[in-house]
Image (spheres, rainbow, N blue to C red):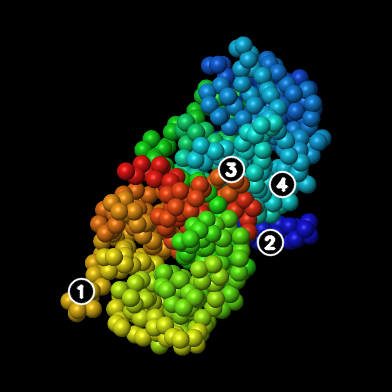
Amino acid sequence: MTRNFSFFSAVAVSLSIGITAALSGCGPQIDKAATGPKPITPQQELALTNVISSQLAPLTLGGVDYLLLASEKRGLVLVDAKGVEKLALDGGTVERFALHMLEEDNWLIALYDEDSGQMQLRQLDLEEGSPRIRYLGAMATTSPQVAMCFSRQADRTHLFAIDENGLGHEYVVHPREQAWQFTGVRPLYFGEQVSSCVVDDHSGKLLVAQPPLGIWSLNADAEMEEAREVFAASGELAESHFGGLWLDGASGNLWLTAGDKVFAYSINNPRQGPQFVTALAELEPVSAAVQKGVLLALEEESDKVLQFAVELPGPAAEMLTFRGPVEIPRVRASGQTAPVQSGGDAADDPAIWVNPANPSASLILGTDKKSGLSVYNLNGELVEHFPVGRVNNVDLRPMQHGKYVAIAAASNRTDPGVSLFGIAADGKVEDLGLRNLDMGDPYGLCVYRRGADLMTWVSDKDGAVQLLQIVPGEGNADWRLQKVAELAVDSQVEGCVVDDEMQTLFFGEEDGGIWRLDIAAFLAGGAKPQLIAPVDGERLAADVEGMGLYHAGDKSYLVVSSQGNNSYALFSRDGSQFVGRFKVDINLDKSLDGSSETDGLEVSSASFGEQYPQGLLVVQDGRNRMPSQTQNFKLVSWADIAETLQLK
């Protein structure tokens, strides 16, 4: 492993040149040859006693200003604004810590203790007006941690920790009966020489300093695409060693150290270049921060904090008007299926078979679009897998035919056609074989009943949508597909669902929105699809993917996967009115992650017992976390959705 990361670092040097060149036209650059302003000298020194610190952070307790310092001799040390020591751990070797305010006068601290090889959680608060530090929990690590930072997500506290090899991990840290727990969310990969990190909760960005490349910016939310990009290139910093990130949330300025200089960047507009640059006389700081208008700096392994009187940058103009993304309501996942067999983008679309005799014995059918169709029970356990090829979408309807009580159909892209499956009353699923289609690439599919007939719409990935009748046969080999009509569409269609009672087709144009078609009128020759819900980037964010209908009388809804913002949109049954939206979130009690980048979904209003009394929503999860595994399907109780969105 060490050899691999060393190779990454060697490549990183050459990459740094390219990144710097690419950003040479972005924002003001620092001229290495320029003499610049005269280096400033400290106004005051706060002498420390046997601390030996390389990191500081300001905080407030009970209206009093303090400084928290890492100590290689005494763990953590807290001093007041005059440098008077108030408390210390008096034990441990700590070089790095992270600080996060849980609430007023209540701070959470994560630290790495070299002596024990542990990441530890501590709480800093007040007891009878005096500061105190309490132990919360710990976790052993295999490598020393060189960077730690907290993030606040949906009322949870997340911790990012990166080790000396550049391997990072995201954890949810949360209380349990005996001690706080570290629940792993995902790994993150950087390479060697990471020096520090910080998270801006307003924008949801994780910033990581990695000399000699620069400062990376990536999404802190594990359910979003990583979207890694350069926040500041090393050429702007004019130094090969930099770090010491500290975020001033009030002003929106990111402070960092590089060589003998201190920089400040606007967190929302780094392309403008640094808002503040100053050199410190005869000093190379490794940690800097601002407290009450005073610049604080700390040398490596120092026993003194230096205070500088300088004109500091005010809040950036855009910070005064900046608004973070609108928070979408969240519903916790209730269960999940086993991961699919194939890696990469593999799981795609689910269907739900309701066992009328025993709803708790119902089944979930899910496509693995690289290998076949999987069958799961409601506990998410894999019951059977049919390796029938690259099946993309699956749907089913009740149909009494011989021993079968339901028929499922799945679009198959390996040998263009539709794979059919029969479901017996006891829940046994059988492969009825493939029926070929005159179609280049079968993609989306949805099944419905038209009287006694079983029908299916199948879309060609690069062409029209065909309406087919599934004609039963005497034996498995006698089933056939009979083309009834063809619907021309302007662009790619995948997700679709039919309201059998209303004989209405809903289909999603991935970049356009939701379309509705009166099937009977279309077959009579006079109807065309209507765009009823266009993509607007908020209610619906491209791509529009999975669709399902929740049938419950006047409480019926059209449910749609809004892939672009990892949410699910609810519309009235006819699709004309937007009802609300939500995300599927982490369930720490069951060690379940949320869902994101959902392709297909299915929903049922049947009562499946105590866990799903008002029905069940099943969604494909494009990023399966906690731990990171191949994709799967998440199960959500409709009762939780109804409560969150206050459906009445």
Q: CA distance from mark 1 to mark 3?
A: 49 Å
Q: Give the amino acid type for the residue marked by disc 2 in the picture.
A: Val
Q: Which of the two labelled residues, at mark 4 and mark 3, occupies the earlier sequence position? A: 4
Secondary structure found at label 3: helix
Q: CA distance from mark 4 to mark 3?
A: 25 Å
Q: Which mark is residue 11?
A: 2
Residue 403 percent coordinates (x, y): 49, 75
Residue at image x 43%, y 46%? 639
Q: Give the amino acid type for the residue marked by disc 1 in the picture.
A: Ala
Tell me the residue that label 4 is attached to.
Answer: 163
Label total for image = 4
Confirm whether residue 72 shows in the render: yes
Q: Give the amino acid type for the residue marked by disc 4 in the picture.
A: Asp
Confirm whether residue 32 shows in the render: no
Name which quarter of the figure residue 97 lies in: top right
Q: CA distance from mark 2 to mark 1?
A: 63 Å
The quarter in which the C terminus is drawn is top left
In contact (CB < 8 Å): disc 2 and disc 1: no
In contact (CB < 8 Å): disc 4 and disc 1: no
Q: Which mark is residue 521?
A: 1
Check disc 1: other Cα within 10 Å, few if <14, some if 14-19, many if 20+: few
Q: Which of the two labelled residues, at mark 2 and mark 1, occupies the earlier sequence position? A: 2
Q: Which mark is residue 588?
A: 3
Q: Depth-wise, is mark 2 or mark 3 nearer the camera?
A: 3
Q: Above or below — where is 77 with respect to 643? A: above
Q: CA distance from mark 2 to mark 3?
A: 39 Å
Q: Above or below — where is 452 with respect to 585? A: below
Residue 482 percent coordinates (x, y): 36, 86
Q: Give the amino acid type for the residue marked by disc 3 in the picture.
A: Leu
Q: Is residue 326 left or right of residue 45?
A: left
Q: Depth-wise, is mark 4 or mark 1 nearer the camera?
A: 1
